[in-house]
Image (tube, rainbow, N blue to C red):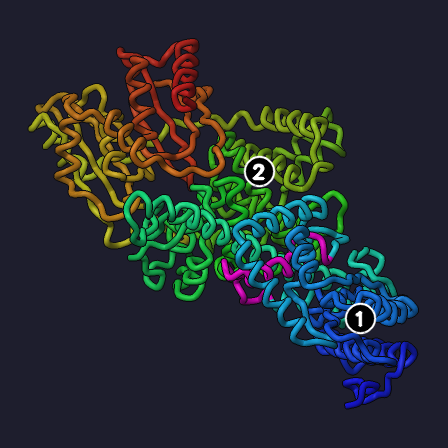
Amino acid sequence: MTSTDTHDGTQNPGPGGYAAARLRLLTGTARSGPPRRAALARLTDDWLAALFTAGTGHPRGTSLIAVGGYGRGELSPRSDLDLLLLHDGSDPAAVAALADRLWYPVWDLGIALDHSVRTPAEARRTAGEDLKVQLGLLDARHLAGDLGLTAALRTTVLADWRNQAPRRLPELRELCAERAERQGELRYLLEPDLKEARGGLRDATALRAVAASWLADAPREGLADARRRLLDVRDALHLTTGRATDRLALQEQDQVAAGLGLLDADALLRQVYEAARAIAYAGDVTWREVGRVLRSRAVRPRLRALIGGGKQNAERSPLAEGVVEQDGEAVLARAARPERDPVLPLRAAAAAAQAGLPLSLHAVRRLAATARPLPVPWPAEAREQLVTLLGAGRPTVDVWEALEAEGLITRLLPDWERVRCRPQRNAVHVWTVDRHLIETAVRASGFTRRVHRPDLLLVAALLHDIGKGWPGDHSVAGETIVRDTAARIGFDRADAGVLATLVRHHLLLVETATRRDLDDPATVRAVADTVGTQSTLELLHALTEADALATGPAAWSSWRASLVTDLVKRVSAVLSGDLPAEPEEAAPTAEHERLALEAAATGAPVLSLRAQDEPPAEPPGDPEPLGVELLVAVPDQAGVLPAVAGVLALHRLTVRTAELRAFELPEGVGGSVLLLDWRVAAEYGSLPQASCLRADLVRALDGTLDIAGRLAERDAAHPRRRGVPPPPARVTVAPAGSRLATVIEVRAQDAPGLLFRIGRALEGAGVRVRSAHASTLGANAVDAFYLSDPEGAPLPGEEAASVARKLEETLRA
């Protein structure tokens, strides 16, 4: 091939020939995407090489180098040409003349040019001072001239980059963070900058630089394809606008979509968002690995000095069954078997979010590859773990995205695929549909103390806009989807009905409050008829606020909040005839009577701990109890509740449900026995022996076991990792809760020893616990305690309020 031939076989003696060939390439329909970008780069290479060698030739000791995007061979129609003229410094005048011969033809064609003329020493020094220059040189590619000069520079720059990586990579990460702060998240913007926004092309380039450092590497699966998609969109944008722009403006989106053969602008944005999500997730994983490696390098010399060398195994702290913390991430335990444990993906995700930790890439990929599908309906533990994950607050977002990146979310919730990365062309909305749903759950996690069923609130928050993936009214479509999804998750028919009502009418309160006359009794009655019950109204109020806060700053205000609150009060007054009934006590079983009689005869606690081999006979779709059954019978005495709860906490048993009530013994035996019927589960590991529990319970009741001290020692030795602080505990006196007792309701974050702290506080207040009804919904404890004074009468109003206030202060301390 002669110096005037191109790779396409056409003569190219000067700017005119190059311009014509370039125009044919860009307007032809035969090639697009990577082939066209590569062909444009080759065409430009040939033209510049011809300019370099034209006329009198080029000075010795010079080379022409493409850097940056051009160096990678990725030329979009309106891309800048990033060029470095490298020389050995022996003939500055000849180099200046060569530069003129190169730069002016480029400018004459109106092509943007980013150029520099440097010696190797100058290039190396500038790279050391300017991170952007160094990043460009990492993609240096020889075009013409002295190949040895180019190769020497590439070798030097790469060696410098790898040697300086511990210092330069944090600088690069900071540069990426600052750019993200200025430009926003590409995957949520209606007019995104394809290059500068977080998850855009610059972030993809940064990941290449990290890989070149040999310090860490980005997850490769899907990354190249995501980058290609963004480059294809930028090509179409350049051809549509005729400008060198990276901003995908609204008015150009339909034409760009058509240029790419896509259905419409929404299909275009969805592809852009999916690509940006892949790049952003890869960035999160990569920068986390960079941080881990740099911390390890910083600690290792000190460890060697202290212990005389040797490789140290990273400390692993248990988080849940099959899940441990290691190096600041939630990872799978060595004994974990995802192929035998279908709940493990949700358990690992919930544990990570609760601890405020990222879920490791290796763990997510292993779960995606080997975990068995959940049975339908889900087992109760899976449902509880989903609720726990949703209630963890802000850390839920990153953990959810890790699951979604590997396809686990759509495997769990197939309808999620229709809302994934779906844009919302509404100035009020700041998120895509899927992210808005997660944001609503995050907001709702702050309102779990306001409702009796936080699990229903969190699931409704996750699914309230799930119908936006279907045509028609999304609330109507969502109602149908949620009924099916609720049954899939394992909610019973009544709970599924409540969820369907919440989704169907999630806009009811705000639309009525802002558009209707609240002084019209018919308006309030219509809302009351639609909602049906106080508990549903309570959930709908919390969902309304969470939805609005997750939409964007323009969707909620103190004015809207006051109108909605006023409406809720009026509707509540209409529904106020539905007072809570006395709790129905289940008839004692033969096992209850046996244990009670044995406890009375021996004067000591008796207990039974047994797993349920067969599921209970329940209507289809009803949730099965969690954990194993623990029955305890104790002669009636003070301190039983904190003693039993404390012993369970010492043995790392989580209380799922708890019932405590007095059992009157048959005539002739006399006295009464306290009967506790609880469901417990091992926090991790296996269950303790019943004999060990009984021995510790005897010691706890006679005062020889210091439960508070033991729990404090354990917490001090192994502090529990927590994520975002949960909402503070809330303790209230239920109005008209019971004719025979005062009902105290406690809503708090579930934690080891919670029931122990509550029981001890109530004992300290000098009140008698007639019965207790505790349940754990995800990470939320919702408990009711029926209290009386020592003589068995309900507490006076002021005393009841004082007990509630002191208990709340204890739990918030």
Q: CA distance from mark 1 to mark 2?
A: 40 Å
Q: Is residue 809 left or right of residue 80?
A: left
Whether 786 is drawn above or below 584: the answer is above
Q: Is residue 637 magenta?
A: no
Number of numbered markers: 2
Where is the C terminus found, in terms of image quarters? top left
Q: Position of residue 611 (x, y in %)?
A: 23, 48
Q: Position of residue 637 (x, y in %)?
A: 19, 20
Q: Secondary structure at mark 2?
A: helix
Q: Position of residue 593 (x, y in %)?
A: 16, 35
Q: Is residue 659 left or right of residue 427?
A: left
Q: Position of residue 613 (x, y in %)?
A: 23, 54
**Residue tagged 2:** 443
For the point 22% across and 45% down, the residue is 687
For the point 32% across and 14% down, the residue is 765
- Circle nearer the N terminus (1, 2): 1
**Amino acid tagged 2:** Arg
Q: Is residue 201 magenta?
A: yes
Residue 329 can be seen in this image: no
Whether 732 is drawn above or below 538: the answer is above
Residue 330 can be seen in this image: yes
For the point 43% across and 46% down, the residue is 298
Q: Is 417 or 225 nearer to us in this picture?
A: 225
Q: Please report the bounds of the magenta region as a residue range.
A: 194-223
Looking at the rendered structure, which numbered label has been put on residue 259? 1
**Residue 797 found in image quarter:** top left
Looking at the rendered structure, which numbered label has been put on residue 618? none
**Amino acid tagged 1:** Gly
